[in-house]
Image (cartoon, helix red, strand yellow):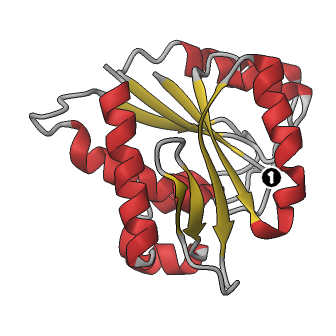
Amino acid sequence: MKVVVCGPSHSGKSTFTAGLIRLLRARAWERVFNRSFTWLTLDVTDNTLPTLVDPDGKHRRKRDVEWSTERAQERRAGFEHRDESLVLADAPGRITDELRLVTEPADCMILLCSLEKRDERQSWLGFAEETGIELYADMTTVLRERIEPGWNDRSDRNGTVRSVSRSAFDTCQTTAFDDTSHRMLKQLATDLLNDSQ
């Protein structure tokens, strides 16, 4: 199952995805699941996800490259040819032709929209419908707002997660998330592993 994490820029996609990756890594090989799992970033201009997932690696956060059809085709091919049970990919934060190209192999999408960018949600839902990508989860992220995290509808995986800053994630990893958001990430990881048979 190929899952892409999408949504507007500055919605907490990188820290959310890094937290989900850490939880999936911890659980994928448990006897209950025994799933192969990998992750990748589809954005050629931003290496934030690798720096969060592998803080000891030699990654630069921003890359001095431009999007092009050729680069998008390369990323798409890398995504398409992964044969693990579950592949989680972090997508760029703007709807463009390159985004359409790199996400083509995706089976489903986790949509993250910050509260400030919630007005862009319909565009992203339209993108999913137009490209035939199933909506797997629809999450609103909040950082400092006085809104309690939690599921609006657990069965539809619709809810609000309290995001964390990159520096907090760098320091504390998944424990940087509040208890409710951490539990929601764990539930989402379990759902993904169950559904990736």
For the residue pair 100 and 193, the one nearer the viewer reads as: 193
Observer able to see residue 59: no
> Residue type at mark 1?
Pro
For the residue pair 50 and 60, the one nearer the viewer reads as: 50
Q: Residue furthest left?
A: 31
Q: How many labels does the image show?
A: 1
Rendered image quadrant of residue 113: bottom right
For the residue pair 159 and 181, the one nearer the viewer reads as: 159
Rendered image quadrant of residue 125: top right
Location of residue 182 in the rendering, given as x and y in whole percent from the top left corner: 40, 67
Location of residue 16 in the rendering, given as x and y in whole percent from the top left corner: 54, 58
Rendered image quadrant of residue 115: bottom right
- Local packing at callout 1 (Cα closer than 10 Å; few below 14, some 14-19, many 20+) is many
Residue at 70% in and 25% down:
103
Check disc 1 and report the residue beneath it.
Answer: 8
Residue at 84% in and 27% down:
98
